[in-house]
Image (spheres, coloured by chain):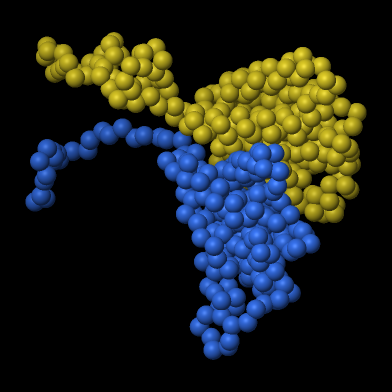
Chain colours: A yellow, B blue
Amino acid sequence: MDHFPTNWGNPRSEDVDSYNTYPVASNSGTVPHSVREIAGFGHAGGHPTSHTQQPVVTGTSVLGIKYKGGVMMAADNLASYGSLARFRDVERLHQVADFTVLGASGDMSDYQYVKHLLDSQMIKEYNADDGHTLATPNIYEYLWRVMYNRRSKMNPLWNTFVLGGVHKGEGFLGAIDLKGTPYQSPSIATGFGSHLAQPILRKEIENRGGEENITEEDATQILKKCMKVLFYRDARSMNKFQLATISAEGVKISEPMSVETEWAFAEKIRGYGA
Amino acid sequence: MFSTYPGQVVVDHPVKVPIEHRFDPYVDNGGTLLSIAGEDFCVVAADTRLSEGYSINSRYVPKSVKLSDKTVISMGGCYADCLTLTKKIQQSMEWYHHAHGKTMSTAAVAQMLSIMLYQKRFFPFYSWCILGGLDEEGKGAVYTYDPVGSYERESCRCAGSASSLIQPFLDNQIGFKNQASQKKTLSLDQVLRITKDSFTSATERDIYTGDYLELFVITSKGVEVQKMDLKKD
């Protein structure tokens, strides 16, 4: 709608079709209008189809650390819509097979699609009925190829996934980002976590002389400390999170929990309380 | 005041122009690699740091892969592309083995890699490849590539983020350039010392190089792997 009265009364311009009412001769040829993507901003006719995306509903950091006997991961329960804390009970840690947990940061709709893909793979494996189930490294490779192929089509799944598990008695912890870059490390942190939490995780591992010297209780304390720092400093985080533990016994995803935080000191600071 | 070209419109107010945000499929994960060909051996060395911007994603992500008892490939640049390319090579080598009943020679892999890279000429693998191994005569061979497949056999080459720091050093120490002393063949021991010194020096000045050094030594006996610490800062 044209809001400027000075423009009213003039004949409508034929060059501009603001509401895509008819297909316009373009280099995309005979692609039907219904197939064209309107991603983020629509295109008035004649533009090539573009897949450029921006994430809409997003999750923040996912943390992971290897310890003696397994892997522990943490992620809060928030899915933000930009600066709005929109969905406050989202489970961003998801059990896949018997010994694997997928943690997702980034676009939540793409995460739901990936959960669907993994479900399909699990069903295929079940149908094969050959005594094998998907192990963590298998799921990791599968996810890597999916992410890489989507980025190669210039239509990425806008996520950074963390995959933790136990395979052949050893812990497995890796990450894959939206460009299809896979990497494994004794500690992983995505998003803001890579700046705020990763230094804490690496220091703790170094102080104890390696992941073999970290007990399950140690890992819990370390991750809670990181989640506290993230709640203080990441503006898109929430003080309600879950911990996932994967060991030889299997997967345990905890109920949502919180950490104690101190805000009372602000009362004494001029501009905040005083 | 300003000269105009036909069709150009000069206005005296700001104009609205659409800004295009495009997804960039490439990322530089950093890292340095080098390979030196000896008389009857070949050394392929690479650091193991995986970076993204100013962050270190992982301190141990191997950049070199043993393809056969005679050939080792090392790649730097966009790690996702490098890993995909490595998989393609390994799969093609397996097919070749089934079809021909023998392992692909280093020279054959070298040519195949060039073709594979050029096949993605219009959406390249962002990877700086160095192929090291023994040729059919048992002599050390090093093949260098650019991201779209141009390749050449050389006696020594360094690629990756610290290549401009190390290559001149190699030209002097391995190629005996700019010095009066006679060219002589270097022993494996001397080459390994030069390689380790190259990496410790590069680690000092290049932020993307460090953590660990993995050395692959290819001789007629096979492939031996050594791992060495580098500074982690």
Residue B162 in the image: x percent, y percent? 56, 63
Q: In the figure, A92 relative to B36: above or below? A: above
The residue sitting at 83% across, 35% down in the picture is: A167
How many numbered circles does the render carry? 0
Question: Which image quarter holds the C terminus of chain B?
Answer: bottom right
Residue closest to the eye, B50 or B125: B125
Q: Please state if A179 lies on the left or on the right of A243 as rendered.
A: left
Quadrant of the rendered structure where residue A221 is?
Answer: top right
Q: Please state if B178 lies on the left or on the right of B3 as rendered.
A: right
The residue sitting at 39% across, 12% down in the picture is: A34
Q: Please state if B41 lies on the left or on the right of A57 as rendered.
A: right
Quadrant of the rendered structure where residue B100 is?
Answer: top right
The residue sitting at 69% across, 48% down in the picture is: B103
The residue sitting at 63% across, 70% down in the picture is: B198
* Residue at the far bottom in the pictured view: B180
Q: In the figure, A135 relative to A24: above or below? A: below
Residue B175 visible somewhere in the drawing: yes
Residue A273 in the image: x percent, y percent? 60, 37
Residue closest to the eye, A190 or A37: A37
Q: Please state if A7 lies on the left or on the right of A114 as rendered.
A: left
Q: In the figure, B1 relative to A56: above or below? A: below
Residue B56 in the image: x percent, y percent? 64, 50
Residue closest to the eye, A104 or B26: B26
Residue closest to the eye, B220 or A174: B220
Residue B132 in the image: x percent, y percent? 63, 59
Residue A269 visible somewhere in the drawing: no
Q: In the figure, A216 relative to A57: above or below? A: below
